[in-house]
Amino acid sequence: MDTSLTPSHGQPITVSAAGDTTLYTPQANKRARLVWFAMSSPQSNTASVVATLKWSGATGAIYAQDMDAPDKFFHRTRREGTVGESLILNLSGAQTVRVNMDCEDFL
């Protein structure tokens, strides 16, 4: 299941479906740059979940993190996708993960 979201830069996103969720897509003919990323999972989750952050066209992960209930992960980073690549969060199971990030478009 792919759910496309269109957040403004830095707006929190709640992901709860297993599988891929699109977190950010750059404007046409531009690349996306991830500069800061954080995830948290609430105590109300009933199980751990593996949260994997990746680019839509990449085979490898940017981050893969086991998220317990509760848990948190954050990292200041500079990761850049290729033209048109979206930033994806994959959850191994249907649990709640809250995402905060700062992205920007560039040529």
Image (cartoon, rainbow, N blue to C red):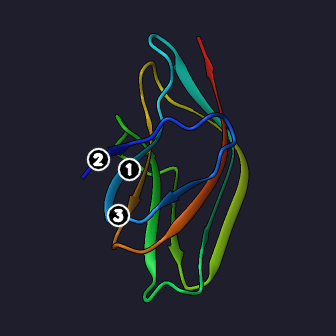
Q: Give neighbour class at mark 2: few <14, some 14-19, many 20+ (Cα, 10 Å).
A: few
Q: Look at the numbered discs 2 and 1 and tell me whether their residues touch, using CB distance below 8 Å.
A: yes
Q: Specify whether 89 is left or right of 75.
A: left
Q: Look at the numbered discs 3 and 1 and tell me whether their residues touch, using CB distance below 8 Å.
A: yes
Residue 21's label in the rendered image is: 1
Q: Specify whether 59 is left or right of 37.
A: left
* Above-or-below relation of 70 to 66: below
Q: Give neighbour class at mark 1: few <14, some 14-19, many 20+ (Cα, 10 Å).
A: many
Residue highlighted by disc 3: 17
**Going 45% across and 10% down the picture, which residue do you hit?**
29
State the image coordinates of residue 104 (x, y, percent, origin top left). Answer: 65, 27
Q: Quadrant of residue 38?
A: bottom right
Residue situated in front as seen by the camera: 58 or 30: 30
Label 2, label 1: how far apart the Cα atoms are: 5 Å
Residue 41's label in the rendered image is: none
Precedes in sequence: disc 3 or disc 2: 2
Q: Residue furthest right?
A: 76
Residue highlighted by disc 2: 2
